[in-house]
Amino acid sequence: LLAVIDLGSLAAAARAEGITASAVSQRVTALEIDLQVSLLQRVGRTVQPTPQCKLVLPQLRQMLRMQTELRAGVQEHRLAGPFKLGSISTALGDYAPGLIGMLGQQAPDVDLVLTPGTSRALFAAFEAETLDAAILVKPPFELPKTMRFRRIVQQRIGLLMPTVQPNVQDLPIILYNREAWGGATCWAAVQQQMPQSRILAEMDALETIAQMVGDGLGCAILPEWAGLFLRFSQVKFDPILSLARDVGVLSWTRDSADPLQ
């Protein structure tokens, strides 16, 4: 109705609204039936509001403004669009299925993009703002005030051994990369607990290390993530007291009110 009044014709209103002139006419007629008054009248080649319509025009325009503001407010807080989340591989296995399932139910319009990587690489990508957030090992340095780290879990660190090998002293050790943020703590434990052990290999790939241990190729000092025993049944874990690593979500402080964060 307001489009017809502002533009002067049913045809012009139809073009502006992207519908047919017949549809515009039907909608105005429905309003007239609801209000029980005539709202439009022809004056020459134009369509103008009736006196009864002019009386309610201020309220109609106010209603339109309220509708527009309400829609904008809802869309501002709507969980929609792409969300780029980086994750270390173990956390990806632990949390991705549940996260995807939850978003599918509660925020189906969110387009989740998952990127695996090491904690160091994920931090660099987050810092460059190619990721919206990252699940990683707690950085071994103080974060700037623009970033925040929220711990999800504290994982025990311990000796991972094959269940088929009775004497761990006869096995070489498979190192969790010493340069990795979680690997530095594990390396210190290796030096303290197994200083004479032969190093078989070194890598920043915990699932691969666990598989090698399960195959009886060596032992390792690793963190205990949730999916460890679900995927690798041929290993046993002996925790080292007081040693652990924190895994959590890295995000921007400015996004603290974002429901996705």
Image (spheres, rainbow, N blue to C red):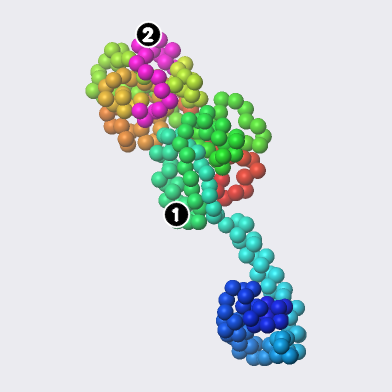
- Judge left or right: residue 14 versus residue 6: left
Q: Which residue is mark 1?
A: 104
Q: Is residue 150 visible?
A: no
- Mark on residue 196? 2
> What is the residue that sits farthest to the top in this orientation?
196
In the rendered image, residue 206 lying in the magenta stretch gets the answer: yes
How far across and down, in percent of the image, does residue 6 sit? 72, 78
Q: Quadrant of residue 54?
A: bottom right
Q: Magenta part of the protein: which range?
A: 189-208
How far across and down, in percent of the image, does residue 218 sit? 31, 19
Q: Disc 1 on helix, strand or loop?
A: helix
For image coordinates 37% across by 36% down, the residue present is: 227
What amino acid type should be assigned to the residue bearing mark 1? Gly
For image coordinates 37% across by 18% down, the residue present is: 201
Q: Quadrant of residue 75?
A: bottom right
Q: Disc 2 on helix, strand or loop?
A: loop
What amino acid type should be assigned to the residue bearing mark 2? Gln
Label whose residue precedes the other's in the sequence (2 or 1): 1
For image coordinates 59% across by 39% down, the residue present is: 129
